[in-house]
Amino acid sequence: MSDKYDALKLDNQLCFPLYACSKEIVRRYKPFLDKIDLTYTQYITMMVMWEHKSISVKDLGEYLYLDSGTLTPLLKTLEKKGFVTRTRSKEDERVLIVEVTKEGMDLREKALEVPAKMGACVRLSAEEAKALYGILHKMLNSMEE
Amino acid sequence: MSDKYDALKLDNQLCFPLYACSKEIVRRYKPFLDKIDLTYTQYITMMVMWEHKSISVKDLGEYLYLDSGTLTPLLKTLEKKGFVTRTRSKEDERVLIVEVTKEGMDLREKALEVPAKMGACVRLSAEEAKALYGILHKMLNSMEE
DNA sequence: TACAATTCGATTGTACACAATTTATTAGCT
DNA sequence: AGCTAATAAATTGTGTACAATCGAATTGTA
């Protein structure tokens, strides 16, 4: 019933459902995010912008677990769409400050329906959601070494 | 303490830690997978190949939640590396049969250490791992509509 | 004050992901 | 049999991800 290769079976992986679930959920977001002209990564970036208004690329990357290779082109796209501005810091020219524009803040109103609509897609009980949230954050913290 | 925008805060998202966790874990796999010349996606593809030996691209995609747009180039890479062959089915020329080669099966031996090494990276208790596994599979099932 | 080390963002290159379209083949229907 | 619909991969185009490297600016230190 069990052999030495059991640990290499897809069904026995913990990481694979995590990876698959993550992708499926992002796919579920797409129809709602299309309406406000954002991709999922742009959406979570805007979440940070809505809260912080002004932030460096470095700090943004730490919140989002993304590096400049991903953020630089993404922020240029958001700038082109008019949702953020990108300006070098006066105090330290190495630092690039990202700031949310009025259009970016206006988008927040339209984005309000996204979490509501998505909530209906992910059918988990309150206890399951809480357990999942706790375990994922524990994993993330343990991985920041 | 709470406002109408609470649902749009990164900290209140359930999907974001899922997305971040998934990426971080894939990043953790990299050093181990580099040793056997596979990316993470190629690794889970080989897991299916090790179990099934022979399978169509369509069935492979259903196991992995991936479509031909991702699988076609990935399988061509695995073919170039000598781990699989790609042949049209005699019964139905539309179907492409992927088969694992001897080199592909040999790789399984070298891959055995990967789950062992990764287990040490993901510091979860047995109960947490089991709960996570259950919740993720419930989500995946509920999303297959 | 020189200057080596560090930091920050941008760039480059590789590899996914997935929607949308295309092409070839097969199945279903009359 | 003839034609339409459906199916399976491949292709195209856009957008991440991330390692590695680069270049400019700043810091720490002798």
Image: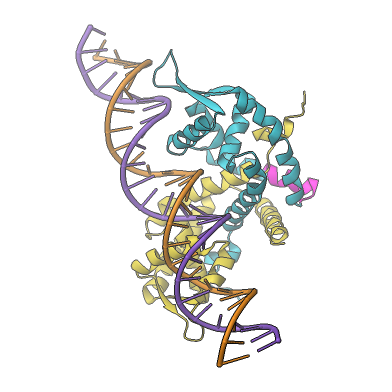
Chain colours: A cyan, B yellow, C purple, D orange
- Residue at (47, 32) in percent of width and height: A76
Bounds of the magenta span? A124-134
Up/down of B30 relative to B74, above or below:
above
Which of these two is toward me, B24 or A77?
Answer: A77
Q: Residue at x 42, y 73 (%)?
A: B105
The residue sitting at 74% across, 45% down in the picture is A117
Q: How many marks?
A: 0
In the depicted view, which residue is nearer to us: A51 or B105? Answer: A51
Q: Is residue B55 above or below residue A139?
A: below
In the image, residue C16 sits, relative to residue D1, either above or below, namely above
Image quadrant containing the C terminus of chain B: bottom right
Residue B53 visible, this angle: no
User: Residue B109: horizontal and vertical position, in percent?
Assistant: 42, 68
Locate residue D29: give its quadrant. top left
Task: Indicate the position of residue A104 as horizontal and vertical percent values.
Answer: 61, 28
**Residue positioned 42% across, 38% down in the render:** A69
Q: What percent of the width, then of the height, locates residue A72?
A: 44, 34
Q: Quadrant of residue B144?
A: bottom right
User: Which is the main secondary structure of the residues drawn in magenta?
Assistant: helix
Of the pair C20 and A8, the residue shown nearer to us:
C20
Q: Is residue A128 magenta?
A: yes
Residue B28 lies, in percent from the top left, at: 48, 48
The quarter in which the N terminus of chain B is drawn is top right
Which is nearer the eye, B115 or A42?
A: A42
